[in-house]
Amino acid sequence: MGVEYALTSNLILGAEYLHIDLENRTHAGFNNFGGAVPPRNHSVNADADVIMARLSFKFGRDEPVVRTLK
């Protein structure tokens, strides 16, 4: 989900939000700190909230305004 707003004819301000939910999982594994430790279960909850802001510049010249003759 995001929004953009034209500040001028060449500058554009934008913002975006993204939520990532990778659910809860239980993994069995060994202790990584050494020693003779039996495997044990680890509960993992991986969620992320990402917010991005941007300022864009549009290169090129403005298109001339063309008026029709009456």
Image: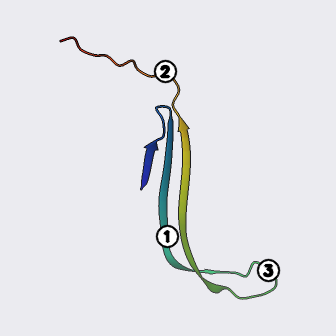
Report the residue marked by disc 1.
22
Question: Neighbour class for label 2 at 10 Å: few (<14), some, many (≥20)?
Answer: few
Number of residues whose C-alpha sits closer than 10 Å to that of mark 3, classed few (under 14), some (14–19) or many (20 or more): few
Tag 2: amino acid: Arg
Q: Mark 1 belongs to which amino acid? A: Leu
Mark 3 vs mark 2: give the one in front.
2
Q: Residue furthest right?
A: 35
Q: CA distance from mark 3 to mark 2?
A: 61 Å
User: Would you name the residue on which mark 3 appears?
Assistant: 33
Measure how far apart labels 3 and 1 are at the Cα level.
Answer: 26 Å
Left or right of 66 on screen, residue 19: right
N-term mark: 3 or 2: 3
User: At 79% across and 80% down in the image, what residue appears?
Assistant: 33
The percent position of residue 22, horizontal first and vertical second, equals: 49, 70
What residue is shown with label 2? 61
Q: Residue furthest left?
A: 70
Residue at left offset 40%, top offset 20%: 63
Query: What's the distance in space between the residues labelled 1 and 2, CA to CA?
Result: 45 Å
Three-letter amino acid code of the residue under disc 3: Phe
Q: Quadrant of the C terminus?
A: top left
* Circle 3 or circle 1, nearest the eye: 1
* Label 3 vs 1, first from the N-terminus: 1
Residue 49 left/right relative to 6: right
Q: Nearer the viewer, mark 1 or mark 2?
A: 2
Q: Is residue 66 above or below residue 3?
A: above
